């Protein structure tokens, strides 16, 4: 191999490493099991939601290879899902999901994979079914806007209006604020492009809308030397969990506002009392 060929191989190797994450799987149970007929993989964060008769197959760890670029939350979860499918498993229990921080621009994951082909899976199958009414003449799309902590990746986004972001689909346009949920009825069926006015392809997503179904679209804003917006379609269980998380955050924000208002009024009353005392002296 000459010098030019060696350089080419090194560049190719670096390119391959730079895209992916660091993935480690440790299989601890290789017992014989039936092939799953349904290849849907469920992601669970709460151990109480783990169905009975679930058998742990092993553990999975996804980290930052040092050159990773394809390591958003959705991409990391997809890596975990594909690993579960490869090992004939259908449940991933997330022990820890680290967000991007100063040390890494990637999401990192530690979890366990389980196998369950019993009737106890029925509740999860029902949750994953996004049909709300087979006879409906419209679909429902939930838009969930959240903010991620700064990461090393930066994409500039157009349409930023003081923490409010422009979203469009078909001929409709609307604005959504961070930490909010907007639900829309969509009458038109078929492939629909939803855009967040981003300069990148990740600022848009295409879904195949069907009447009687509901869909969950995350609008994630990232701020770091500019602002980028990422649109992704997520499953119903993930969407319901995120919706609950956003509602909890909004409740906390409202409680904080009320507490500050009470403290402000209390300080005002104390000032009035002090003035009254000075006036009577």
Image: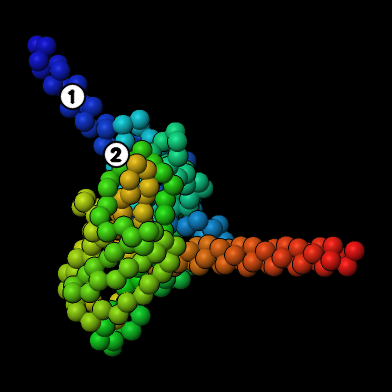
Q: In this view, does 215 lie above or below 232?
A: below
Tell me where residue 254 appears, x and y as whole percent: 57, 67
Q: Distance between the residues labelled 2 and 1?
A: 16 Å
- Label 2–label 1 contact, CB within 8 A: no
Mark 2: give few (<14), some (14-19) or many (20+) Cα within 10 Å: some
Mark drawn on residue 11: 1
- In what quadrant of the picture does the C terminus appear? bottom right
> In the drawing, does residue 172 fall left or right of residue 65?
left
Tell me where residue 85 appears, x and y as whole percent: 33, 51
Mark drawn on residue 69: 2
Q: Which of 132 and 177 is in front in this view?
A: 177
Q: Looking at the image, which residue is at 34% across and 41% down?
A: 225
> In the drawing, does residue 13 fall left or right of residue 240?
left
Mark drawn on residue 23: none
Tell me where residue 251 appears, x and y as whole percent: 56, 67
Tell me where residue 119 appears, x and y as whole percent: 45, 69
Residue 80 visible in this rendered orientation of the protein: no
Residue 181 visible in this rendered orientation of the protein: yes
Q: Looking at the image, which residue is at 55% across and 57% down?
A: 47
Residue 259, quarter of picture: bottom right
Mark 1: give few (<14), some (14-19) or many (20+) Cα within 10 Å: few
């Amino acid at each position: 191999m000459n010098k030019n060929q060696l350089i080419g191989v090194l560049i190719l190797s670096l390119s391959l490493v730079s895209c992916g994450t660091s993935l480690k799987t440790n299989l601890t149970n290789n017992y014989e099991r039936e092939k799953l007929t349904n290849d849907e993989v469920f992601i669970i964060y709460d151990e109480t939601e783990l169905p009975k008769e679930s058998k742990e197959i092993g553990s999975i760890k996804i980290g930052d290879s040092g050159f990773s670029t394809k390591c958003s939350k959705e991409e990391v979860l997809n890596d975990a899902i594909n690993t579960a499918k490869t090992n004939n498993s259908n449940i991933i229990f997330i022990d820890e999901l680290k967000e991007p921080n100063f040390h890494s621009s990637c999401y990192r994951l530690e979890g366990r994979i389980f196998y369950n082909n019993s009737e106890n899976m029925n509740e999860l199958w029902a949750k994953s079914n996004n049909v709300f009414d087979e006879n409906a003449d419209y679909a429902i799309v939930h838009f969930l806007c959240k903010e991620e902590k700064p990461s090393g990746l930066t994409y500039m986004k157009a349409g930023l209006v003081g923490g409010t972001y422009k979203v469009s689909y078909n001929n409709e346009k609307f604005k959504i604020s961070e930490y909010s949920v907007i639900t829309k009825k969509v009458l038109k069926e078929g492939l629909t492009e939803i855009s967040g006015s981003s300069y990148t392809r990740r600022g848009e997503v295409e879904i195949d809308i069907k009447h009687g179904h509901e869909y969950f679209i995350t609008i994630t804003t990232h701020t770091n030397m500019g602002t980028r917006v990422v649109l992704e379609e997520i499953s119903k269980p993930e969407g319901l969990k995120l919706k609950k998380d956003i509602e909890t955050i909004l409740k906390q924000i409202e409680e904080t506002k009320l507490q500050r208002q009470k403290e402000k009024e209390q300080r005002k009353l104390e000032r009035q009392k002090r003035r009254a005392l000075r006036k009577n002296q």
